[in-house]
Amino acid sequence: MIKIRNLVKRYGDRITAVDGLTLDIGENEVFGLLGSNGAGKTTTIHMLATLLKPTSGTATVNGYDIVAQPAKVRESIGIVFQAPSSDDMLTGYENLHIHALLYGVPSHIRKKRIEEVLDLVGLADRKNDRVKTYSGGMRRRLEIARGLLHKPRVMFLDEPTLGLDPASRETMWRYVRRLVKEEKVTVILTTHYMEEADMLCDRIGIIDKGKIVALDTPANLKASLGGDIIRIKTKMGKDGVMAAAKKMGFVRKAEFYDGHLMLTVDDAKRDLPAVLREIEDVESVESASPTLNDVFIQLTGRNIKEEPEGGFMEKFAKYD
């Protein structure tokens, strides 16, 4: 459904936002672009949606070239931007009616199609209320409905739950899954929320500094770390803890990150007592199975800086 070859976007001589991106995305796939702010996610989406011209490289969406056939690409896609773009003073139905006209939805099916997408995103009972009375989550769902009016083959969701509270985020996830099942569209999702990517995506491309640094299913990406992770905060210096880690034969990998010793082991519950015997002046210990955040740290050397509920070791055993 989407074919990208050596796509590059530069701003002047100093800034390369997307750096030689090559990627294939299949039909009816939910594909996640996972990365921190400034990694190149939104720039990639904007090029695929024909809002930005690439500096070099090629890409096709639904078989249409993003540079040579932009009108055909736009007919094939729906898009939900990061920033809200619905008219606050109009009702939900009125917003959709205007966009149905702009999208060229035939008059004989226009009303039926608006009702269908309102039902899909759970807003049928609020269709005659002004958008200014909607919650943040309802506004995002209305914008998904708007993008679906013309039955696109591809849907771009650019940080669809940015700024939403955890409950609204989970509600949005349910509607995205329903969208894929009922509308049979390919979804390209950009996010920096690890749990969101894990929950929704068939495959994930981790993007860093404009490059894809890993590409696989969420399960395979987590499995690539090879075991449970123990994170220790201690008053020992880096050299001391690394030397202690080397003495423990069961440790697969030892790294020092953000003032913590990160150990990869086969079984954290079994190995933790031995770890605590070797490491002195322990202030805290966390252990858990690998998360996508751990994968991101491993690949990029830094945290994606999520909100607290999606951060490292959301569910862990902690010992003080």
Image (spheres, rainbow, N blue to C red):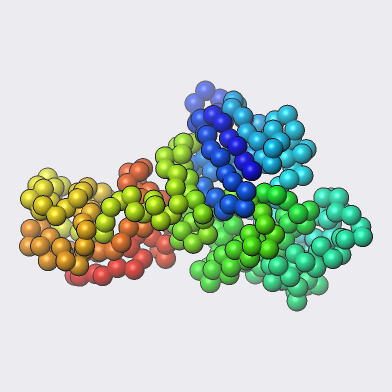
Residue found farthest to the right: 108
Left or right, 107 with reference to 91: right
- The residue positioned 42% from the left and 43% from the top of the image is 214
Residue found farthest to the bottom: 125
Task: Using the image as rendered, state which of residue 232 and residue 189 is in the foreground.
Answer: 189
Q: Quadrant of the N terminus?
A: top right
Q: Quadrant of the C terminus?
A: bottom left
Left or right, 216 with reference to 30: left
> Residue 51: x and y, percent?
68, 38
Res. 239 visible in picture: yes
Task: Using the image as rendered, state which of residue 76 and residue 19 is in the foreground.
Answer: 76
| Above or below, 37 relative to 167 | above
> Residue 159: x and y, percent?
56, 54
- The residue positioned 10% from the left and 58% from the top of the image is 279
Left or right, 183 with reference to 214: right
**Quadrant hosting residue 97:** bottom right
Res. 52 visible in picture: no
- The residue positioned 15% from the left and 63% from the top of the image is 271
**Quadrant hosting residue 293:** bottom left
Task: Using the image as rendered, state which of residue 239 and residue 116 is in the foreground.
Answer: 116
- The residue positioned 89% from the left and 54% from the top of the image is 106
> Residue 142: x and y, percent?
71, 63
Residue found farthest to the front: 27
Q: Count how many numbered circles sit on residues in the image.
A: 0
> Residue 151: x and y, percent?
76, 54
